[in-house]
Image (cartoon, helix red, strand yellow):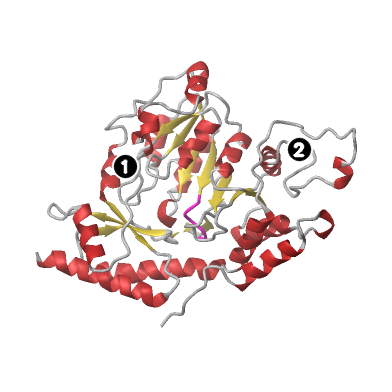
Amino acid sequence: MKLTIKRIGERETAYVKEVLDSDFRGPRNTNMLKRVEEAFSKRMGVEYSIGHVNGTATLHSALYAAGVRAGDEVIVPPLTMAATTMAVLQQDAVPVFADVVEETFQIDPKSIEKLITPRTKAIITVALYGLSPDMDPIMELAKKHNLVVIEDDAQCFLGEYKGRMVGSIGHFSSFSFQSSKHLTAGEGGMVCTNSLDAADLVRRFSVLGYASVSAKSGKITKDDIQNPNYERHASMGYNYRMPDLCAAIVLGQVERIDELVQRRIDVANLFLDVMKGCDWLIPQYTPKEYKNTYWGLAVRIVSPTISWADFRTKFMELGGDGIYATWKLTYQEPMFQMMNFAGKEDVIKATYKGELQEWKLGLCPVAERVQQQILAFKTNYWEWDRAEKQADILKQTIAYFNAK
């Protein structure tokens, strides 16, 4: 029997105490941010990691460093949390929605190719539910058309694509440490890149445009701030820095990453074993050369007689913890239907030289169909006996509908 895992363990607690004992004073600086950035870079196989306050700020910084400006187009998937697209709007750019692959739920390279125009500047991929998109053809398109690829890997830690670590393939990658993610500090995020120039831009953008910060250094010195002639701000920037307390917890989580990720994989496999032989529950397809790390276990229900709602209701009646729906497609959200972008709609109207997509039914037909089918099961069970109980309830639910 597998043991209970602590979500927040002794390492995290010790690092937090180290920060608290410093009283947040310069002379006692723990260099916690530098430590976690170096640890994360080493584990992800990238040159530079820059800590952020959350996993939306990370995308905003990456878009800026990628050279995305007002009126540029950024191709995004609609089947994901809307923050991916909101970051595009924050940078005064125009999101263009590509359809997804039915079996994997990932952005479709063929759809991307049809949408590239002279105004396209970047592509954001999303490793949905812990699985990588098909990155090789996407990177080939980017090279052909001189585009920047930003991986949104908020849901995928230690995933693999054809022998490469997810997060090390695109020009930038973005990770989140929000409370539901594989690693968490309650909040927080990380931008990764292998380009020194890009890392410098990300850092400066995320630290109020300070002239003296860089890829490897996120703080200004006392000599700088005590100099009346110090010219602090080389450019416009945002206050997106990761706080030391978050950095302390993330450092502990990075040091436990294998254990934390493996638990989600084990839970997913437990549920998948129960589903074997059920031809109306179709799990997200994981190609042979990919490693899925299952932020959640996503399954399509494809039965003419069993509705999504009926399955969830019976699962919960039998004691299940509940099943998540996938997000409403981003362009179907009220903010898009009403073009209510907190004033960004005026910037788009003033700067965009293309023709906006029509954000209506039929824009991305595969994503629209899949979105209605997906049942997303939790995988973050730290007590193994609880995971086994949920798997048994799932087995009972399937048997109930098979018997009808």
Which quadrant of the view contains residue 111? top left
Residue 402 lies in what quarter of the image?
bottom left
**Position of residue 211 in the picture relative to residue 339 (left or right):** right
Q: Is residue 362 magenta?
A: no
Q: Amino acid at mark 2?
A: Tyr
Return the mark for residue 210. Answer: 2
Q: Which residues are magenta?
A: 153-158
Q: As displayed, is residue 297 above or below residue 134?
A: below
How packed mark 2 is, by other alpha carbons closer than 10 Å (few <14, some 14-19, many 20 or more), is many
Magenta stretch, main secondary structure, is: loop
Q: Residue at x 55, y 51 (%)?
A: 175
Residue 206, percent across and down? 66, 41
Instruction: Return the x and y of residue 83 as percentages of the image width and height.
Output: 47, 41
Q: Is residue 42 visible?
A: no
155 or 252, nearer to the observer: 252
**Residue identifier under label 1:** 367
Residue 156: percent from the left, percent from the top? Answer: 48, 56
Q: Amino acid at mark 1?
A: Ala
